[in-house]
């Protein structure tokens, strides 16, 4: 099997704040195989976006790295200087479409000016080269090319998001990170954006995608692998279908039960809620971080942290319920 | 119980109000006692405008709203207070419903302005009781400022107002769309429990077809200011008539089935 595109090992990072350290990423291992769409799911404040920043080697105060390594296509990116990362990694090897990117565009500049500024951060290219790159990419993705001469507000939300994603692939990176790319869009536009993400992967414009969201149905539609994150840790991972339809970890189960889709399964199940709220990362509970909300919590869960144990090849879960099964 | 007849709302914009926007276009709807109804539509479909008209926050350009047979479209003063004690709103962003300078106690105690006067001890007892009913410990919220509570907790406080007031109808405008998946269900459940306990009615105004399908007794689909489809959720999902409903059904991401070509 080919070597994975990205490997993150034992990543630990925290925010230094006046009231104490926030351990937003606490011992995370993550692998992005080539040709995959990896979904990273979890609730707000669980550390998803921080993890993405670490994987991108975008670690700046108040975020501090405590340990771990990221191998991106053989490059140890956390050991590189920021300048090196900007020249050799960002835009060229990885691209990132942050959350709410469609509202972050400078309204006084045309799309092409924004693209030019962005591209020049990473590579010296002439105006003409940049325009022809755009033309080729927009044609490949069936986007109207003349939209690059417009101002951001002249495009609809869905078109803006698709233009941003297309732009982020201009320098042919291998890996694309998208963070909640469809959260502000209505369902039909959302589907178009997902379709386009799938197309750029299938057409080999990029190799793999990491898709960050808290909406499991979206991952069901496009992800090949899923990682579930809770309070700074990965609690379960594996092939998308397996994790989303037959979850093992009580938190993943709870998340799945809280999904409301217009399907008979969802209506028959009715309203099943989990008590409580995600814990504070400043003072997380001892033991398993989910135990205060877990219906199956045992004594051991209150004192010891469950390790992330591989159940089958390619999937794993961090829960004592399943550890004991292994032992038996 | 509640009936809206031929509601139209035209907003005027542009220079001297020359441009017209028809937000709600000749809509009629009714809500029966003890029923959970969902009004589904995307942004700009006019669902929020319709819900603000029903709540008597704005007046329609034409048409009328009746509550228990009594017209409430242009109520004022004492009578409006009576209406608001019967029909209560819960909104999308609980942040916007709270004045950031005041402690959350104020939002709760203000409800008593809509109720017959009672002693402070009684009010205090009711506030504690309501907070407990929505799954909050009174000591963890009372005396706090809105920003010290999480989104889910603020929405619970907003619903605690309903538990004090015991309205006959709750209009909930996107009450869970800003909340995380795992807290969403808990909030939806509160509305249902409230209905079961008081035999009140609930109207969910939402863009989330899944939410509407899962919890309602009846759904109304709104598109471009009109109600284009109405009925039992299962029936509407299985046999949608209007092209918009069909498109909606096709484009909502599902959990148990994959989209064609994906």
Image (cartoon, grey):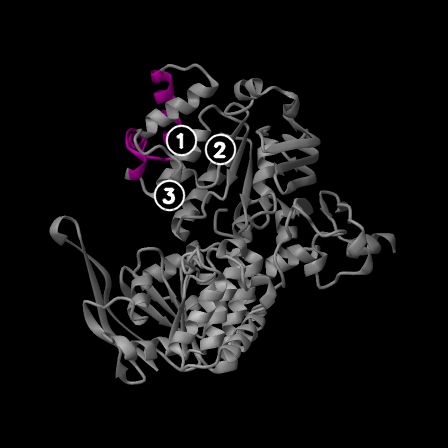
Quadrant (top left/top right/bottom left/bottom right) for the C terminus of chain A: bottom right
In the rendered image, the vertical position of residue B137 relative to residue B100, given as above or below: below
Instruction: Please report the residue visible at 69 percent of the width from the left and 32 percent of the height from the top.
Output: A66
Q: Mark on residue A203?
A: 2
Main SS, magenta region, reads helix
Q: Is residue A144 magenta?
A: yes
**Is disc 1 in contact with disc 2, using a CB cutoff of under 8 Å?**
yes
Q: Earlier in the sequence, mark 1 or mark 2?
A: 1
Q: Mark on residue A158?
A: 3
Q: Earlier in the sequence, mark 1 or mark 3?
A: 1
Across the whole image, how many numbered discs are drawn on residues? 3
Badge 2 density bin: few <14, some 14–19, many ≥20, Cα 10 Å: few
Q: Which residue is mark 1?
A: A140
Q: Chain of mark 2?
A: A
Residues drawn in magenta: A127-153
Q: Position of residue A128 (x, y in %)?
A: 34, 16
Q: Chain of mark 1?
A: A
């Amino acid at each position: 099997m080919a070597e994975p595109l990205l490997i993150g090992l034992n990543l630990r990072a925290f925010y230094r704040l006046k009231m104490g350290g926030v351990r937003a990423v606490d011992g995370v291992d993550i692998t992005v195989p080539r040709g995959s769409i990896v979904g990273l799911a979890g609730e707000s404040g669980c550390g998803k976006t921080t993890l993405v920043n670490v994987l991108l080697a975008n670690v700046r105060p108040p975020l501090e790295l405590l340990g771990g390594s990221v191998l991106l296509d053989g490059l140890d990116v956390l050991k590189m200087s920021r300048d090196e990362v900007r020249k050799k990694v960002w835009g060229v090897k990885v691209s990132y479409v942050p959350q709410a990117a469609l509202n972050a565009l400078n309204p006084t500049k045309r799309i092409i000016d924004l693209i030019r500024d962005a591209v020049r951060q990473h590579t010296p290219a002439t105006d003409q080269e940049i325009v022809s790159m755009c033309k080729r990419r927009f044609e490949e993705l069936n986007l109207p090319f003349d939209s690059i001469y417009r101002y951001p507000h002249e495009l609809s939300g869905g078109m803006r998001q698709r233009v941003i994603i297309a732009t982020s692939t201009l320098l042919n990176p291998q890996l694309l990170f998208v963070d909640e790319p469809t959260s502000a869009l209505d369902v039909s536009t959302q589907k178009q954006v997902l379709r386009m993400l799938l197309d750029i992967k299938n057409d080999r414009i990029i190799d793999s995608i990491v898709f960050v969201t808290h909406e499991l149905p979206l991952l069901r539609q496009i992800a090949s692998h899923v990682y579930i994150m809770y309070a700074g840790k990965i609690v379960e991972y594996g092939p998308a279908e397996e994790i989303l339809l037959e979850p093992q970890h009580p938190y993943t189960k709870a998340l799945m039960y809280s999904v409301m889709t217009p399907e008979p399964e969802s209506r028959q199940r009715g309203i099943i809620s989990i008590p409580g709220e995600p814990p504070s990362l400043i003072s997380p509970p001892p033991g398993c971080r989910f135990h205060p909300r877990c219906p199956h919590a045992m004594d051991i869960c209150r004192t010891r942290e469950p390790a992330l144990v591989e159940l089958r090849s390619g999937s794993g879960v961090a829960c004592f319920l399943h550890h004991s099964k292994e032992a038996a | 119980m509640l009936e809206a007849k031929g509601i139209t709302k035209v907003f005027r914009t542009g220079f001297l109000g020359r441009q017209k926007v028809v937000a709600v276009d000749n809509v009629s709807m009714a809500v029966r006692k003890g029923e959970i109804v969902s009004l589904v539509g995307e942004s700009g479909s006019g669902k929020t405008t319709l819900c603000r008209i029903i709540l008597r926050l704005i007046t329609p350009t034409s048409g009328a709203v009746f509550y228990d047979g009594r017209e409430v479209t242009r109520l004022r003063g004492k009578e409006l207070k009576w209406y608001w004690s019967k029909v209560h709103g819960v909104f999308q962003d609980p942040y916007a419903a709270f004045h950031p300078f005041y402690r959350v106690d104020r939002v709760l105690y203000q409800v008593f302005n809509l109720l017959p006067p009672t002693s402070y001890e009684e009010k205090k007892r009711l506030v504690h009781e309501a907070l407990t009913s929505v799954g909050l410990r009174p000591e963890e919220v009372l005396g706090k400022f809105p920003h010290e509570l999480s989104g889910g907790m603020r929405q619970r406080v907003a619903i605690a107002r309903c538990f004090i007031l015991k309205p006959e109808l709750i209009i909930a405008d996107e009450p869970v769309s800003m909340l995380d998946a795992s807290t969403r269900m808990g909030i939806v459940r509160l509305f249902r429990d409230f209905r079961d306990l008081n035999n009140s009615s609930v109207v969910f105004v939402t863009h989330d077809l899944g939410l509407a399908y899962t919890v309602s007794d009846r759904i109304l689909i709104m598109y471009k200011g009109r109600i284009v489809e109405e009925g039992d959720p299962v029936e509407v999902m299985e046999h949608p008539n209007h092209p918009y409903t069909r498109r909606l059904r096709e484009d909502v991401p599902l959990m148990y089935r994959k989209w064609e070509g994906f």
